Amino acid sequence: MKKLLFLPAFLFTILLCPATGPSQDWTSLQEAFRKVKSVQADFLQKRRLQILKDPLLSEGRFFFDASGSLRWEYVKPLRTVMLQKGEAVRLYHFTEGKWKPEMTQAVEARRMVLAEIQQWFQGRFAENKVFSHSYSPGPPARVALTPREGINRFIQRIEIVLSVKPGIIDRVEIEESGSSRTSIEFRNVEINPSFPSGIFEKP
Amino acid sequence: MTRRRGLYILVLSVLAVSLGCARLPENSVSPGSSPDLSFCYAGFPAEPWESVHKIEATIRGGVFSTLLGVTRGDPSERRLHSILLTPEGFILFEAELRDGKIRTLKALTPFDSPAFTRGLMEDVTLIFLCPQGKPASWRIKGDGTRTCLWESPDGSRTEVKGSMELGWQILRRDNQGGVTREVSLNGPFVQGLASHLELRAFQPAAYELRMTLLQTGP
């Protein structure tokens, strides 16, 4: 389960990577990365499955603070939220007019995965034991991530397409085994915003 | 006096008959006269379909989980292909039913036991595919409610009752008559699929699934 949860965990990470203009090299990219202290954005997720003619569309938003807090929230078609603050990870689902905690084993697995990817938040891709990376300056600039042994049974390739505007990611494409794919397009991205108190603690 | 006593007996008789009809056991299904049994299958999709459901699962003890369920089915071939995903879109479980055999394509812990696979695919079959063969008995009540009963060689029974207007209820009983599954299908119906449905399992494990149709297609 832990390995499989790398997908959402990895998504969180790559959303938070600061992007650079097409002329910037990898070192500059990482330098920009270190300047990001917080991020918020809306997203549209398209999940393509072999057995579905039309993709599954989900809309949501996320908030990240480099001190180790994350709020990953879907607003359509399901209303769910994952909150991480330090070591604690909690999941909630909105039903019958109120937020209800999700008591699943996935909570613990997610906590472990998210703890591991704190490295990624700091741009330490070279230290990552799950994916190897390559950078293409473009345009558009792209970061390709190739899974190492083990995770490649589930994910074949991930590509992050960067905006020309530093700190902005246009979209992420994830290719899985079979013909399943997921793309996430980002909108209204804000770098280093201030967050209201409790956003990482209360659904 | 004799006329009055006759009238009294008549009124009592009518009341007795009326009460007797009203108190017929719910599961007392008697053979009907109509050879057209299409009403027995009205609560199930008739053509190939694909669907996406929100699934809210509650297991005995109060454990609560929300998942996405994707299903593609072909009623004429009795084929099903089902996928369970997290809200983030990650596949937890994938299996198909073809030629009466269940094949697991992907299953992660804790969804990787043969018992889970069999139980899930039996639930999906109960919800989306009408029971095999012709019903053993059926009836249409005065209020338009239909009841159809299928009997399996192993003694288990499946009862489908309701109407498109009121929704449908599916009861699955074991060979001792105990209810093992109860499904409520409520409209509006889209391509034969209920917009809202609830499945309650009583044995061998107790759990409840509340499903909301999010997306459907051919």
Image (cartoon, coloured by chain):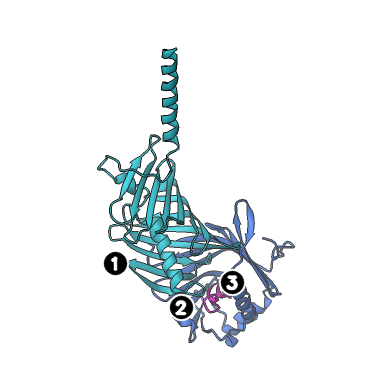
Judged from the image, the secondary structure of the residue bearing numbered disc 1 is: loop
Q: Nearer the viewer, mark 3 or mark 1?
A: 1
Question: In which chain is the residue bearing label 3?
Answer: A
Judged from the image, the secondary structure of the residue bearing numbered disc 3 is: loop
Q: Which residues are magenta?
A: A1-21
The single residue placed furthest to the front in the displayed view is B2
Chain that is coloured cyan in the picture? B
Q: Nearer the viewer, mark 3 or mark 2?
A: 3
The residue where tag 3 is placed is A105
The residue where tag 2 is placed is A154
Question: In which chain is the residue bearing label 1?
Answer: B
Foreground residue, A93 or B5?
A: B5
The residue where tag 1 is placed is B99
- The answer to whether dots 3 and 2 both sit on one chain is yes
Chain A painted colour: blue
- The answer to whether dots 2 and 1 both sit on one chain is no
The image quadrant of residue A37 is bottom right
Foreground residue, A202 or B199?
A: B199
Identify which amino acid the numbered label 3 is placed on: Gln
Judged from the image, the secondary structure of the residue bearing numbered disc 2 is: loop
Compared with residue B7, is residue B78 higher up or lower down, i.e. above or below? Answer: below
Residue drawn at (41%, 65%) of the image: B121
Give residue B31's position: percent from left, percent from top.
30, 43
